[in-house]
């Protein structure tokens, strides 16, 4: 989700989510992020707000932040970080499956959305898959908690931690 919010709005976003929760409440936030691998350079096609392919055709109002930035903004809003999980390798496989399904339904997709939209999304998903595979994109789930009135939020341990 935070790829749709943009770095400049993350403080406001996480503050609003924090206010919406009762003390002890949990917030699971899933977001596509950029990484610092390769010096943090994003190829032009992947840039959102400066006229690159993705910004122009796929996510015109999006902006990538790092997972570290998202966590920092969440903490400044008052959240306690319970867990962070990278789903990067899984998302590469998800995109592979989405492209295969889109190609298998190409005729119907073209009829519903048109040739340009079909080709745009096929290209975007295939290229994004590569970025998840090479580590320049990440997708992470942040499990955040609004601390309880008595202190830190209660969160169950994962079953394998008990052995």
Image (cartoon, rainbow, N blue to C red):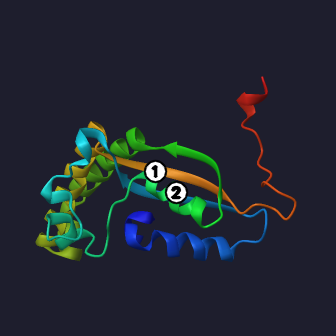
Q: Is residue 119 visible?
A: yes
Kindly indicate the quadrant of the structure image that contains residue 133.
top left
Q: In x, y percent, where is residue 149? A: 85, 65
**Viewer-side residue, 27 vs 147:** 147
Kindly give the residue lying farthest to the front in the view shown. Answer: 76
Q: Is residue 37 above or below residue 20?
A: above
Q: Residues within 10 Å of mark 1 (few under 14, many from 20)?
A: few
Q: In x, y percent, where is residue 98? A: 31, 53
Q: Check contact, mark 1 vs mark 2: CB within 8 A.
A: yes
Residue 68: which disc? 1
Q: Residue at x 21, y 75 (%)?
A: 113
The C terminus sits in image quarter:
top right
The N terminus sits in image quarter:
bottom left
User: Under tag 2, what secondary structure?
Assistant: helix
Q: In x, y percent, where is residue 96? A: 29, 45
Kindly give the residue lying farthest to the top in the view shown. Answer: 163
């Amino acid at each position: 989700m935070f790829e749709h919010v943009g770095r400049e709005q993350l403080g406001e976003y996480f503050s609003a989510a924090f206010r919406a929760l009762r003390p002890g409440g949990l917030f699971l936030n899933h977001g596509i992020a950029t990484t610092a691998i390769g010096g943090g350079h994003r190829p032009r096609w992947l840039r959102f707000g400066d006229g690159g392919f993705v910004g122009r055709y796929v996510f015109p109002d999006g902006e990538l932040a790092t997972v570290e930035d998202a966590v920092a903004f969440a903490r400044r809003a008052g959240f306690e970080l319970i867990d962070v999980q990278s789903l990067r390798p899984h998302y590469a496989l998800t995109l592979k499956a989405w492209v295969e399904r889109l190609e298998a339904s190409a005729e119907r997709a073209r009829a519903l959305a048109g040739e340009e939209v079909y080709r745009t999304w096929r290209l975007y998903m295939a290229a994004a898959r590569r970025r998840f595979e090479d580590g320049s994109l990440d997708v992470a789930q942040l499990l955040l908690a609004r601390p309880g009135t008595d202190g830190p939020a209660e969160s169950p341990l994962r079953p394998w931690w008990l052995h």
